Amino acid sequence: MTGIKTKGEKRLVLISGRSHPELAAAVAAELDTTLLPVDARTFASGEIYTRMEESVRGADAFVIQSYAAPVNEWLMEHLILLDALKRASAKRVTAVVPYYPYSRQDKKGRGREPISARLVADLFKTAGADRIMSVDLHAAQIQGFFDGPLDHLFAMPVLTEHIENTVDKTDLVIVSPDMGRVRVADVWSDRLDVPLAIIHKRRDPTVPNQVSVHEIVGQVAGKVCLLVDDMIDTGGTIIKGAEALKAAGATGVIVAATHAIFSPPAVERLSSDVIDRVIVTDTLPLPPEKRFDKLEVLPIAPLLARAIHEVFEDGSVTSMFNGAA
């Protein structure tokens, strides 16, 4: 039976939404299975319909959906898939969310604001998710928004292995693009055994996506700087940071991030001469218009597949990461 992997009485079912079928297919290949056939379509009115084309009764179901634009459409499709599985008597349903939607709205910065990341967690729960699996959450506190297990996976081992294989660490320094990412950058620094620097910046709260860089804490002159972040959206933070590093005497700037959102004008900004390389994973789809010469894309499917295997086998997802944070 396609899409189902059996172990004793347990059955693993892998389902894909329509946002990033290439990633779901790669995960299925890593697990040596196939995706469950699903009839998914959007009616002329914009409403979404889904139906599993095979029985999932008693199965351990994993539903993969990535959140590129249009985010709201893919969120609704994910919720409908989860609801369909629950109503079809799947034993356990896991929402596999490589990039968690609305993750930057994780707290109230001002009065009368929503906490949208919490709302999304509630929607997953209501739709039928027993568990969530995600990669590099923008804020660790999101783990507490979901009333159930949330497996927080880290792409750092994937990225750092590539860096170690392709970069001379002699003059390398890890750079945090802002104070909020210092903890993550510090772990990168420890893992690669290289120095750490920090860019201190301020945002203008009245102008979205505008960043002002103020000063660099740490020695970057004569160094190759590795700017690390969890995501790149419009690229404003990254390009401002790269320009500041070059102005401070850095000989090179490499950018590494997990989630390549690449909203316009990110590609134009990242193609700038002040950036030498951009390294990301494929948690989000990267169509031709979002690719450029300096871009290097690393596969995240092996990490997701291993985590799914651990959950299915009632193993330990935590054991996959030795000190990553």
Image (spheres, grey):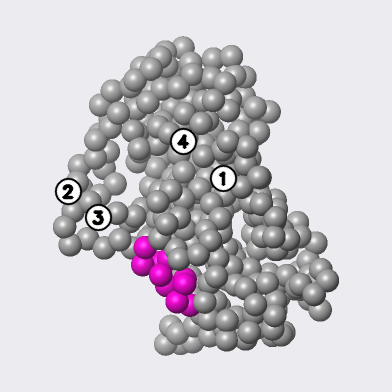
Observer-nearest of 220 and 57: 57
**Quadrant assignment, res 64:** bottom right
Q: Which residues are magenta?
A: 118-127
Residue type at mark 1: give it: Phe
Q: Residue at x 51, y 31 (%)?
A: 187
Label 4 or label 1, whichever comes before in sequence order? 1
- Disc 4 marks which residue? 184
Q: Residues within 10 Å of mark 1 (few under 14, many from 20)?
A: many
Label 4 or label 3, whichever comes before in sequence order? 3
Look at the picture and state if 251 lies above or below 134: above
Identify the secondary structure beneath mark 4: helix
Label 2 or label 4, whichever comes before in sequence order? 4
**Quadrant assignment, res 159:** top right
| Residue 206 visible here | yes
Name the disc covering residue 206, or none: 2
Residue type at mark 4: give it: Val
| Residue 68 visible here | no
Identify the secondary structure beneath mark 1: loop
Residue type at mark 3: give it: Lys
Mark whose residue sits in front, 1 or 2: 1
Queried whether the magenta region covers residue 125, the answer comes back as yes
Mark whose residue sits in front, 2 or 4: 4
Residue 132: x and y, percent? 53, 63
Q: Do labels 2 and 4 touch, CB within 8 Å?
A: no
Q: Residue at x 61, y 47 (%)?
A: 318
Look at the picture and state if 150 lies above or below 242: below
- Disc 3 marks which residue? 108
- Disc 1 marks which residue? 154
Identify the secondary structure beneath mark 2: loop
Queried whether the magenta region covers residue 97, the answer comes back as no
